[in-house]
Amino acid sequence: MTRFNIDGERMLSDLRKLRTFGECGKGVKRRAFTDADIDARRWLASRIADAGLIVHVDPVGNVFGIPEGAKNSILVGSHSDTQPEGGWLDGALGVIVGLEIARASRQAGGPPIACVSFQDEEGRFSTLTGSRAWTGVLSLAEVDQLVDAEGLRFAEERKKASLIGPIREVPTDWFRSFLELHIEQGPILETSGERIGVVRDIVGIRGERMSFVGEQNHAGTTPMQHRQDAFQGLVRFTSDLNVRLREIVRPATVWTIGHVAVHPNAASVIPGRVDFSVQWRDPSDELLQQMRDIVHQTASATADAMRLEWHTSDYSAIPATHCDPTIVAVLERAAQTAVPNGWRPITSGALHDAANVSKLMPMGMLFVPSISGISHNFDEDTAVEDLVLGAETLAAAINLLTN
């Protein structure tokens, strides 16, 4: 198969153009199905057509560029929607690199490469909505029932997909593998001075809603020894949990007590109830279950010690994903050639569309450094040289896979 090389300047030009759709200072506001998102997808569809690829827009608004007649392509891409206050590279880099690789390969007579921008990866309606629908994790009927924070239904919003192009199904068996280039969204590569991360795993995620219930009472007249303070229960739980989890976790493991609601949340009232979320992430499903046991044991012990009730609900579990070993080995070869001793194997602490696609075909990912480890923020950025290097390394890996 003929080898191909990408055009780094052309790729950067397209990437900067995509940034203008929803641009806000240094960042971007381009939520799924907003005007900025639809305009960006229409522009992307035009660039796909200009590249000689066939534009396909599926029923949920995923945009594909497919070589004519090809039914065994390598699919390369990511997502182009953003967080409410998003960076310009999260997802967008992978989409544009997918376009550039597909375009360059076609021009050189190389292997058939298709590109994609998945819809609503960032969760306006649900986590990884577009790729979950395309891979069958959610049926179209289930997706249509999703509602955003303002009460708008996905079923109504997805009608806008017809503004991008004709709607048609894109069978998953048209593709033999999936590759995604993404910014790291963390500090590891920059801190280590390395320029490429070869992803081996995407973490699994577990989460629960919990509550401690005590007794609401007067903050001035209730002696400390008589209090059943729900918020102090959360403080103790947090401290004890940190101690216990640090005994079993690994460098890639993280845990977070996120959303907290204190009732009645008044200066002169002892809190009678505190509701909170607990989330933990690791690439080992076995360790994630062990962590859940410790979370429950610690919460129960806290409630007993402080004379509180403890309640838990809404347990959710997203399994860990392991990248295809053959693709990982080829990505490592390409990285070693591009930057000898300047790359590392890495675990993704964030979810990606690649995790859903891996259920149907071999999958691999590359990371490039995030400056100061910042993402989901207007200040998100990556050095231009690293953007081009990441694209070139991914293209080199595809050349290895197909020759």
Image: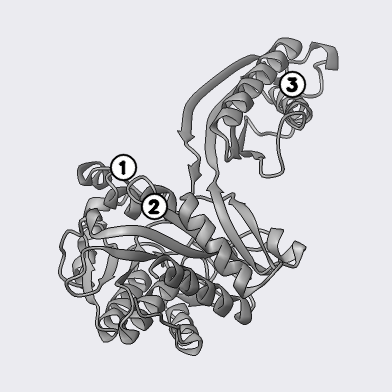
Q: Nearer the viewer, residue 113 or 46?
A: 113
Quadrant in which residue 98 is drawn:
bottom left
Which of disc 3 and disc 2 is earlier in sequence? 3
Give the distance between the C-alpha atoms of the residues marked 2 and 3, in whole angstroms: 60 Å
* Residue that carries the numbered disc 1 in the rendered image: 137
Q: Is disc 1 surrounded by few (<14), some (14 to 19) or many (20+) residues within 10 Å?
A: some
* Residue 230 percent across, percent down from the top left: 69, 22
- Mark nearer the viewer, 2 or 3: 2
Q: Nearer the viewer, residue 285 or 85?
A: 285
Q: Is residue 122 visible?
A: no
Q: Residue at x 42, y 54 (%)?
A: 363
Amino acid type, label 2:
Pro
Q: Disc number at residue 362?
A: 2
Query: Vertically, is 181 above or below 209?
Result: below
Amino acid type, label 3:
His
- Mark nearer the viewer, 1 or 2: 2
Which of disc 2 and disc 1 is earlier in sequence? 1
Quadrant in which residue 345 is drawn:
bottom right
* Residue 253 percent across, percent down from the top left: 66, 40
* Residue 320 percent across, percent down from the top left: 50, 40
